[in-house]
Amino acid sequence: MTDQAQKEGGNAWQSEAFIKNLTKRKRAERRFRLTGLLAIITALTLLAILLFSIVSKGYTAFVQTFVTLDITFSEEVIDPNGTRDPMELRSANYSKLVQNALRAKFPEVTSRRDLRRLFSLVSGDADTKLREMVENNPELIGKTEPVSLLAGDDVDMVNKGYIDRNLIEDDRRVKDMELSWLDVLEADGDIEIHFNTGFFTNGDSREPEKAGIAGAMVGSFYTLVITMVIAFPIGVMTAIYLEEFAAKNKLTDLIEVNINNLAAVPSIVFGLLGLAIFLNVAHLPRSAPIVGGLTLALMTLPTIIIAARAAIRAVPDSIRQAALGLGASNQQAAFHHILPLSMPGILTGTIIGLSQALGETAPLLMIGMVAFIADIPSGFGDPATVMPVQIFLWADSPERAFVEKTSGAIMVLLGFLILMNAFAIFLRKKFERRW
Amino acid sequence: MSFYPLLIVLLLMSAVGYWFGSKKALSTVRKSSNFITPRPHQFGLYVVIWALVPPVVLGALWAMLQVTPIQMDTGAMRQIDRVVFPVILLLAAGAGLYFSILRINPDLRVRKTIEGVIYIVLILASIISILTTLGIVLSLLFETIQFFGKVPMSEFFFGLTWSPQTALRADQVGSSGAFGSVPLFTGTLLITFIAMCVAVPLGLLSAVYMTEYASSKFRSAVKPMLEVLAGIPTVVYGFFAALTVGVFFRDLGDSLGIDVVSESALAAGVVMGMMIIPFVSSLSDDIIMAVPQSLRDGSYGLGATKSETVRKVILPAALPGIVGAVLLAVSRAIGETMIVVMAAGFAANLTANPLEAVTTVTVQIVGLLVGDQEFDSAKTLAAFALALVLFIVTLCLNVIALIVVRKYREKYD
């Protein structure tokens, strides 16, 4: 380049219009880059808001308020005949003991309506606890002992600060009278907060303070076992067939098209399929984990097949050639060499499919797993519900205390999902081979 | 005999057969001079196959017979089911055992039999996906035809009112049931549209940033975090939409003096969009990655900045693929159930105002089918008709999207 040209060019580049244009373009560049970054930040902020709103509402579900009362195990209530007959001890009126204790604590309360309010300070579950105490230790009868009892849901809500004391009384679920009783109990040091073991050991209940997710967890477990037992072998067999044996023909094409389409069918349609086939035609029990598991298995099958095919395809052809060269049959090469090598990938895909199944709600609503079930299921044919459905049911309940329970249950469910996905990632990191 | 004892006896028989078959094979093979023979355990498997295949096939046939509407409750049939049939099964298994053990000799090519059976089992497993599709189509179609026997097709597709509550008694006032599904489809479209307004810009822009600007470190840290959005169960989004976002929009509207219901289409749509962001972003990520580097290099060589390259070269080149991704996202949004069940309204409302409550196809399916129902009322059958429409629409969207994406891939491969 000559000096002349450089000079002229330099002039053109430094011309005012050019520089103006360049700054404009550079600014547009920065703006575009910032927009992209903002999009990511927005998405992550939304995620953070979601998680924060769940955790901030739900962490209190793991503790529960207890009221300590001096319970007099009076003989005339529990065992008026003095026989200590276990049958009689079992059927005695233990709520009466709680009521007597509360009356003794607040002798000024007399009217029937106020008394009902007073008694609701303590959960209806209290008599079970007293009965167990007496059955385990009949010596207690006739003595007076401080017992820590589960508080009613309103007390719990006030104690956790969910009910604003400054509201006018008519707008408040808990009235001034109850608040004054609570203040007395609080001043006497009778109100305590403990870890809520009942949340993990109880089944569902209409009363929030007693409701737990054990039933839903067990139901989810049974359902997932069925899903895995059905979907995993069938998925692996299909993947092996399609990758290793299938001839290029109409049938194979049809199977592949079907798998891809099933992967995109809305989950609720699988629910209707389960309703029509498993309940109306095969007459399997309604609300049972076996039906839920079968339905979810059909839903997860495409995920597992697609993951397993990818894992099998990743095994290099040289392995197959070597096996065939040593005289193995096609099936021996597939089952003895390719399948074991692709197993980590297949398992990762399976776990991810199962974690989808664990979080699925809509198809299970269709097959009746949404009924109120207080008992913890003890088999594949028992009526049961699963964790996401339990969350749905609680989210629908009007009581304020169920909001906390719902968020708590969501935290437990997310915990399980994180565990499963972490395990899948661990499997992949530990066993995956790059060829 | 009931199912489990029968199963246990069959398994015991096959275990005995396996042991006996391998043992006999071992002894005969030792005597023979023929070297290239199957291994003893394969003879064992051969015997097991002969013991298990006949009863399994018979059992499957019998189960199918029971599903068909032949009257099974008569005493004689029950007797057959309880006594005669298990005996036949066990006899078949025993005969299989006996003859297969009898046939064992070193020259028997048992591997061929075993592999043949395994091959058939593999094909049967693969066919389950076809059967599932067939099951969906048939079960939906069957109930839908019944539904259209009760409600005229024109009312379903063009009617403007939806109130499926049928009267319990004939003389009850009102509520004879109206099955015009137009408000449901408009409601679904409204919520889907809102969801797309959230998900497409956010998803697309984050994909562009991830592929074109982000360092690999940033990418590997942020991408999994975005994927978390896809892994959260929909019921959690529903709870979030109903309790946090819906209330937030209502309060915001109150403070601005606008009337927003707490079950607004806006809340459900925004949360659904949030759920679909990672879906759009990872699909567009793949598609943008697939644009050949030479196009970028050409653009840079002409002096374009990165953003100019993205806007004028990469996005136009990737457009078909992105359209495919958006179609897939739309089909996802249409079929989404829990968010709308928990956060959208239940009453059918023919409106395009996102601040009002609308209902969707999936909400109505859930509403019609949850709880005990008798299966001949138009109310329950309507759910199947809605589901069939949903199935067909999502299927079409997916097929179109897949064709578009495949065409696009072929262009650059």
Image (cartoon, coloured by chain):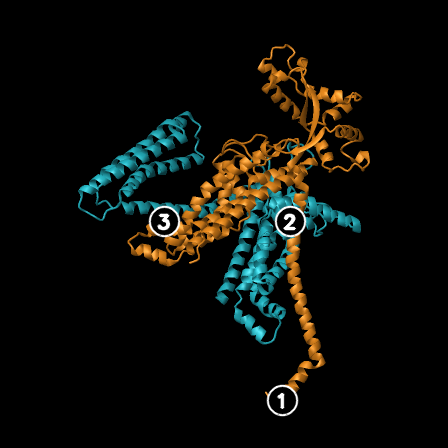
Chain colours: A orange, B cyan
Does residue A51 show up?
yes
Query: Residue drawn at (50%, 41%), measured in percent from left and top?
Result: A295
Q: Mark 2 points at which residue?
A: B182
Up/down of B188 relative to B86, above or below: below
Distance in Å between CA atoms under marks 2 and 3? 53 Å
Q: How many marks?
A: 3
Hey, what amino acid is under mark 1?
A: Asp
- Give the percent coordinates (x, y) of residue A213: 59, 35
Q: Name the residue under label 3.
A: A335
- Give the percent coordinates (x, y) of residue A284: 49, 34
Element class at badge 3 = helix
Q: Relative to the observer, which residue lies in front, A403 or B402? A: A403
The reply to whether discs 1 and 3 touch (Cβ–Cβ < 8 Å) is no
Up/down of A95 relative to B357, above or below: above
Hey, what amino acid is under mark 3?
A: Phe
Distance in Å between CA atoms under marks 2 and 1? 76 Å
Distance in Å between CA atoms under marks 1 and 3? 75 Å
A38 sits to left or right of A310: right
Q: Mark 1 points at which residue?
A: A3
Hey, what amino acid is under mark 2?
A: Val
Which circle, 2 or 1, is nearer the viewer? 1
Residue A172 - label: none
Q: Tell me, yes or no, whether dots 2 and 1 are on the same chain.
A: no
- Give the percent coordinates (x, y) of residue B238: 64, 45
Which circle, 2 or 3, is nearer the viewer? 3
A140 sits to left or right of A169: left
The reply to whether discs 2 and 1 touch (Cβ–Cβ < 8 Å) is no
Q: Relative to the observer, which residue lies in front, B283 or A18? A: A18
